[in-house]
């Protein structure tokens, strides 16, 4: 039977089961009570079951210890952010599991072992205050960079407490700006004023749980007295305010996001708001008098039509005056896309993906025209990410360069000058000798070419018994790119396994069109792509279904759930991390409503008709033999509700399937709140996969 027809029949059969299931009472709703006594008792029972099954071996203990040593290693790259004359880094290690916020100078940072000044010790703060604080970032006021707004999370959740901090005194400001725990957006306007969006009470949040009201809050006044300057709709995703603080370009802005993929940008002058005349699905960057637009759909304006995925530039004052003569700094092709934009004082760094390989260019506007040159000294292969060091004050930039086998390097350079210099490089955390990276293509059910990367022994004839781990995501325009991972290295590759990374539709490898090809009713195309990659590995003799494992998290967890229900015959084991699984209720759980632009609205019968085909919770059946599966999640994940994984496991256990479950009581959407937890969760996943996929030892 042809593959497209086989998959269609599977989807239709799943749909029939889902129709009956959608109207039946959900017996597992009690597991959605995140911290309910009964739910947590169930979690602890499952955790004990999984730890007993997976953690008793010497191999697990060795892997766990090695992962933790790597995560705590002083040889890691301490990535920094420039704030004034100092370079700041947040650092966790064995002595400081919750972390240190610290700083140094560029001269010191260039040294192999820089001298650091501690600004805030999060472990000490948590002990003093009786809180399990997890660092969630800092927003500091330019140009003095004395005052900061620190975001601290309890246990790793997205919701944070915001507190004002003094970088000179190295302490929280008495009576300073403080916002209680919520999914807040707080930004500086000036030293005496902030824009704040938070939970102001009933009706102040969107259905996704984010702020819809933007207020201006003056120092010394209660939060309740802040002045409302903008209100979005309750069914929006969020709204927030901010100020461009660059000298000579000061301007207030309000941003509203009606959906996950659309936004409106307003210039605020006094009490007036001027909406920027751009496509709602285009992302706008305003920097030093220039407007840069990243298009997500074709746009006919002025005398030109610009393609989806293009990067356009125009002077902001000319645009506001009605000029639409944009310069296209990047125009996509069938196999290329825009990977990033980083303006500096006089240049724009444009990062391109060419068949999932990075190319970096520097643009400069000079004598009335834009010039384009490649950034010198970069490798032909590797994932390259670029960021401005201090975009308003210089043309300095950081580069991070990585691939599967080469330890990640950090470079520093100045645009318009010589090639960048390497500042730091990771040590080799695993033995990469004899391994090779290759790129391949599979053909999906509709004929689409789907690329994927493979890391395997070089020059060795494929062995169908080789344990092979296939990773995928396929959503929200997020590309899957090569990167150095000690965990993958010694947890999988050193042991003789093959590692594969799939670039399926739904991701951003080929720009907006690659993402949009798998939205809503076309979601099945992402799953067909992943199946095609798996089948291509079998066809090429790399592995067999018995030895092929798969792993993915969040939207990738939804992918794993669908691989379980759609093609249980194709995989030997599955790890499903922080997943969405109940697509009938996802939009009612935590941030789920913000993703309806990706998946659709289950309350709309026409959309539920296709959503139900990729709702694993409704499609798992008692009379099907499924591969063994490990689900992991976090109690403190307030983005993807842990109820998804809990309920799926409860249903599968009732049906008699081979399933394990582990829920970290802290951790947030990342799954772990510190290095100890992160190492343990990774060790669980690799141990589970290897134990299920490795060939049985020969009997003497």
Image (spheres, helix red, strand yellow):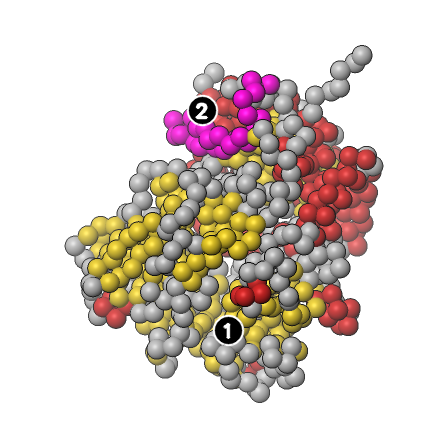
Residue 289 lies in quadrant: bottom left
**Which stretch is magenta?**
436-463
Percent position (x, y) of residue 672? 68, 52
Can residue 265 be seen in the rendering of this structure?
A: no
Tell me if mark 2 has few (under 14), some (14-19) or many (20+) residues whose alpha carbon lies within 10 angstroms of its own: few
Q: Which residue is rendered at x = 60% and y = 68% of the image? A: 103
| Quadrant of the drawing holding the C terminus | top right
Can residue 144 be seen in the rendering of this structure?
A: yes
Q: Is residue 440 magenta?
A: yes
SS at circle 1: loop
Asked whether 429 or 120 is in front, the reply is 429
SS at circle 2: helix
Is label 1 in contact with label 2 (beta carbons under 8 Å)? no
Determine the residue located farthest toward the bottom in the rendered image. 220
Q: Which residue is mark 1?
A: 84
- Disc 1/disc 2 C-alpha distance (Å): 58 Å
Percent position (x, y) of residue 361? 35, 51
Residue 583 lies in quadrant: top right
Work out whether 400 lies above or below 195: above
Percent position (x, y) of residue 189? 46, 78
State the predominant SS element of the stretch in magenta: strand
Q: Which residue is mark 2?
A: 4
Q: Is residue 269 left or right of residue 58?
A: left
Work out whether 189 lies above or below 686: below
Residue 638 lies in quadrant: bottom right
Q: Which residue is rendered at x = 55% and y = 25% of the image? A: 458
């Amino acid at each position: 039977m042809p593959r497209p027809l086989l998959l269609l029949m599977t989807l239709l059969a799943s749909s029939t089961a889902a129709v009956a299931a959608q109207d039946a009472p959900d017996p597992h709703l009690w597991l959605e009570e995140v911290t309910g006594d009964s739910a947590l008792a169930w979690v602890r029972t499952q955790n004990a079951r999984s730890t007993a099954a997976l953690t008793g071996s010497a191999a697990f203990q060795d892997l766990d210890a090695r992962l933790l040593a790597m995560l705590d290693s002083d040889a890691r790259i301490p990535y920094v952010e420039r704030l004034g004359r100092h370079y700041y880094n947040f650092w966790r290690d064995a002595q400081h599991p919750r972390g240190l916020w610290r700083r140094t100078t560029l001269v010191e940072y260039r040294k192999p072992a820089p001298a650091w000044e501690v600004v805030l010790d999060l472990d000490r703060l948590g002990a003093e205050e009786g809180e399990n604080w997890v660092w969630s970032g800092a927003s500091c006021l330019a140009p003095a960079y004395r005052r900061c707004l620190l975001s601290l999370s309890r246990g790793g959740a997205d919701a944070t407490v915001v507190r004002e901090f003094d970088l000179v005194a190295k302490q929280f400001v008495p009576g300073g700006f403080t916002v209680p725990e919520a999914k807040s957006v707080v930004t500086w306007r000036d030293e005496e004023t902030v824009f704040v969006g938070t939970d102001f009470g009933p009706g102040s949040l969107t259905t996704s749980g984010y702020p819809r009201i933007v207020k201006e809050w003056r120092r010394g006044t209660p939060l309740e007295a802040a002045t409302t300057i903008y209100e979005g709709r309750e069914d929006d995703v969020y709204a927030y305010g901010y100020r461009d603080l660059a000298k000579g370009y000061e301007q207030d802005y309000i941003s509203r996001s009606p959906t996950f993929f659309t936004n409106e940008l307003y210039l605020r002058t006094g009490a007036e708001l001027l909406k920027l005349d751009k496509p709602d699905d285009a992302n706008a960057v305003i920097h030093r008098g220039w407007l840069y637009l990243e298009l997500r759909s074709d746009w006919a304006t002025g005398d030109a039509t610009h393609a989806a995925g293009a990067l356009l530039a125009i002077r902001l004052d000319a645009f506001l005056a009605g000029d639409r003569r944009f310069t296209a700094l990047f125009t996509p092709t069938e196999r290329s896309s825009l990977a990033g934009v980083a303006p500096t004082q006089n240049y724009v760094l444009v990062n391109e993906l060419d068949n999932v390989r990075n190319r970096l260019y520097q643009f400069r506007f000079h004598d009335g025209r834009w010039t384009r040159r490649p950034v010198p000294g970069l490798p032909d292969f590797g994932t390259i990410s670029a960021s401005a060091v201090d975009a308003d004050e210089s043309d300095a930039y950081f580069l991070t360069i990585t691939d599967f086998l080469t330890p990640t390097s950090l470079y520093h350079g100045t645009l318009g000058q010589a090639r960048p210099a390497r500042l730091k490089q990771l040590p080799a955390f695993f033995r990469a000798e004899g391994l090779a990276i290759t790129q391949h293509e599979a053909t999906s059910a509709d004929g689409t070419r789907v690329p994927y990367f493979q890391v395997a022994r070089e020059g060795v004839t494929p062995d169908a018994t080789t344990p092979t781990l296939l990773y995928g995501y396929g959503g929200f325009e997020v590309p899957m790119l090569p990167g150095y991972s000690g965990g993958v290295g010694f947890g999988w590759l050193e042991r003789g396994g093959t590692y594969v990374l799939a670039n399926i539709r739904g991701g951003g490898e080929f720009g907006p069109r690659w993402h949009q090809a798998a939205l809503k009713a076309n979601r099945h195309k992402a799953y067909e792509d992943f199946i095609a990659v798996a089948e291509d590995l079998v066809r090429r003799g790399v592995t067999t279904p018995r030895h092929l494992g798969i792993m993915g998290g969040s939207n990738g967890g939804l992918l794993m759930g669908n691989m379980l229900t759609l093609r249980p015959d194709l995989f030997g084991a599955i790890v499903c991390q922080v997943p969405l699984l109940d697509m009938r209720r996802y939009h009612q759980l935590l941030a789920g409503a913000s993703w309806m632009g990706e998946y659709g609205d289950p309350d709309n019968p026409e959309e539920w008709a296709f959503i139900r085909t990729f709702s694993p919770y409704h499609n798992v059946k008692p009379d099907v033999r499924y591969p063994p599966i490990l689900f992991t999640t976090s109690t403190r994940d307030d983005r993807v509700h842990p109820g998804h994984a809990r309920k799926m496991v409860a249903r599968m256990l009732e049906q008699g399937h081979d399933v394990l479950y582990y829920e970290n009581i802290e951790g947030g959407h990342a799954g772990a709140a510190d290095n100890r937890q992160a190492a343990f969760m990774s060790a669980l996943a690799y141990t589970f996969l290897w134990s299920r996929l490795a060939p049985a030892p020969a009997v003497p």
